[in-house]
Amino acid sequence: MSKSIRVDEDTHAALAALKGDDESFDDLLSRLLRERRETIEAGAGLWAETDAAEGARAARKEMKEDVGAR
């Protein structure tokens, strides 16, 4: 069963520019989702066994406190 989705003209133009000549819009969206999934999976665990996550949490907390002080 197929579904229809509405997109504005700018979104359609951007998607059309990304679409290969031999790709349907369904193929394009499937490819983009697959690539995004692969990118996320490739990044999973990058901070394992480092203190990077704690550093990021501290930086986020500091930024939030700075914004709240304004």
Image (cartoon, rainbow, N blue to C red):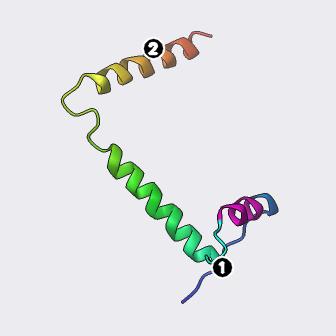
Question: What main secondary structure does the magenta stretch of the protein show?
Answer: helix
The amino acid beneath tag 1 is: Ser
Q: Estimate how packed mark 1 is, as few (under 14), some (14 to 19) or many (20 or more) residues with alpha carbons within 10 Å.
A: few
Q: Quadrant of residue 24?
A: bottom right
Could you tell me residue 29's position as x and y percent? Answer: 56, 68
Work out whether 23 lies above or below 14.
below
Q: Quadrant of residue 48?
A: top left
Checking the image for residue 62, the label placed there is 2
**Disc nearer the start of the sequence (2/1):** 1
Quadrant, the N terminus: bottom right
Observer-nearest of 54 and 36: 36
CA gap between label 2 and label 1 equals 44 Å
The structure residue drawn at horizontal position 61% and vertical position 76%, both measured from the top left corner, is 23
Q: Is residue 40 left or right of residue 48?
A: right
Observer-nearest of 66 and 24: 24
Quadrant, the C terminus: top right
Could you tell me residue 12's position as x and y percent? Answer: 74, 65
Could you tell me residue 11's position as x and y percent? Answer: 73, 59
The amino acid beneath tag 2 is: Glu
Q: Estimate how packed mark 2 is, as few (under 14), some (14 to 19) or many (20 or more) residues with alpha carbons within 10 Å.
A: few
Helix, strand or loop at label 1? It is loop
Checking the image for residue 65, the label placed there is none
Work out whether 10 lies above or below 1.
above
The structure residue drawn at horizontal position 63% and vertical position 74%, both measured from the top left corner, is 25
The structure residue drawn at horizontal position 34% and vertical position 43%, both measured from the top left corner, is 43
Q: Is residue 17 magenta?
A: yes
Task: Specify the farthest residue to the right.
Answer: 9
Helix, strand or loop at label 2? It is helix
Checking the image for residue 4, the label placed there is 1
Q: Quadrant of residue 49?
A: top left
**Residue stretch in magenta:** 11-18
Count the numbered circles shown. 2
